[in-house]
């Protein structure tokens, strides 16, 4: 299932479009995006799980659209075998508590 959502004036997430496909390949994403393009005259930003089919289809249908990675998906993938964890991320992702021994 392919889903496009947006944010309304009150900051609520609202469904914009949905579609059905057998796989998340470039052809199915292109068909979904073409239908979305017909319904929308505006450019927008896409936040996704970095699906390869979407990444290939998006620039073909919306060449000026920004494509960003979903931080939740990146967080889940960091540390598994598919991604190397850079040392700076390990330090930055450590739990943050009250400063101890810091003199202002």
Image: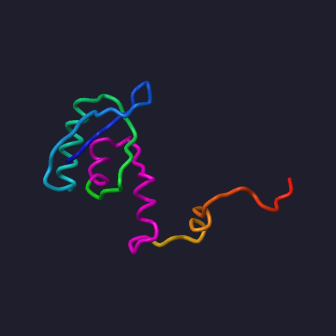
The residue shown at (36%, 50%) is 48
Front residue of 97/84: it is 97
Quadrant of residue 11 in the image?
top left
Does residue 9 sit above or below 103 in this rendering?
above
| Count of marks overlaid on the render | 0
Kindly give the residue lying farthest to the right in the view shown. Answer: 103
Kindly give the residue lying farthest to the top in the view shown. Answer: 9
Whether 78 is among the magenta residues is yes
Front residue of 73/32: it is 73
- Image check: 7 left or right of 51? right
The residue shown at (43%, 70%) is 83
Front residue of 45/94: it is 94
- Image check: 34 left or right of 62? left
Does residue 28 sit above or below 88 in this rendering?
above
Percent of width and height locating residue 69: 42, 53
Kindly give the residue lying farthest to the left in the view shown. Answer: 22
Give the image's coloring scheme.
Answer: rainbow
The magenta span reads 54-83
Percent of width and height locating residue 2: 23, 46
Front residue of 55/8: it is 8
Whether 16 is among the magenta residues is no
- Image check: 90 left or right of 40? right
The residue shown at (29%, 54%) is 56
- Image check: 73 left or right of 61? right
Quadrant of residue 23 in the image?
bottom left
The residue shown at (29%, 58%) is 52
Does residue 34 sit above or below 104 in this rendering?
above
Percent of width and height locating residue 1: 20, 48
Does residue 71 sit above or below 62 in this rendering?
below
Quadrant of residue 61 in the image?
top left
């Amino acid at each position: 299932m392919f889903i496009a959502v947006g944010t309304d004036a009150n900051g609520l997430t609202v469904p914009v479009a949905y579609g059905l496909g057998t796989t998340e390949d470039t052809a199915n994403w292109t068909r979904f995006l073409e239908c979305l393009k017909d319904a929308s005259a505006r450019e927008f930003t896409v936040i996704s799980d970095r699906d390869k089919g979407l990444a290939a289809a998006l620039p073909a249908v919306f060449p000026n659209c920004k494509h960003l990675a979903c931080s939740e998906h990146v967080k889940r993938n960091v540390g598994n075998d598919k991604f190397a964890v850079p040392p700076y991320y390990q330090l930055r992702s450590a739990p943050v508590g009250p400063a101890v021994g810091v003199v202002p």
